[in-house]
Amino acid sequence: MAAVDKLDHVRTKLKEQVPLITHMGIDVISWDGSTVVVEAPLEPNLNTHGTAFGGSLYCVGAMTGWSALHLTLMDAGHLPSVWLAKGEVAYLKPVRGTLRAQTTISAEQRERILQDYESKGRVKVSIDVVIREGDEDAVKLGAVYAAMKQDP
């Protein structure tokens, strides 16, 4: 499956299986084999202060890590079932523009993910996601994701 097809697969899966994603405008923008970027527009995600709602920021961050693990496994030829097992978020400063989250799967992480998944049929991994406002970190999400092989 080509990289664009994988990205489209993940986008479609999120939008079809998590209806809130569509309302929030969340979209997986890019995947280069190690770094994933997920965005959502500010307008449908506003809070009472005119900045990004904390729950929306959490959701964008959570979908970024989810996408990274899903795409990492897809790149290795797998079609996994992925879910968020645990997440902790730190809101460092308000986000006043596009909610743009990113994470990178290191070569070492990828190796461990694939080794566990291929040998055990499942994997748990910690993934750190950041949302920036200008040149500064605005939100940090540390989350644990799990994946297992889908039933045929």
Image (spheres, rainbow, N blue to C red):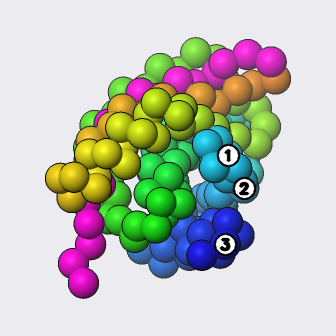
Secondary structure beneath label 1:
strand
The residue type indicated by label 2 comes to Ile
Is 146 rendered above or below residue 112? Answer: below
Q: Looking at the image, which residue is at 60% across and 69% down?
A: 6
Q: Which residues are magenta?
A: 135-152
Q: Is residue 22 visible?
A: no
Residue that numbered label 1 is attached to: 37
Q: Is residue 102 left or right of residue 135?
A: left
The residue type indicated by label 3 comes to Ala
Q: Is residue 46 left or right of residue 113?
A: right
Instruction: Name the spot of residue 140 as percent of width and height, x first.
Output: 53, 24
Mark found first going from the N terminus, 1 or 3: 3
The residue type indicated by label 1 comes to Val
Q: Magenta segment, principal secondary structure?
A: strand
Residue that numbered label 2 is attached to: 29
Q: CA distance from mark 3 to mark 2?
A: 16 Å
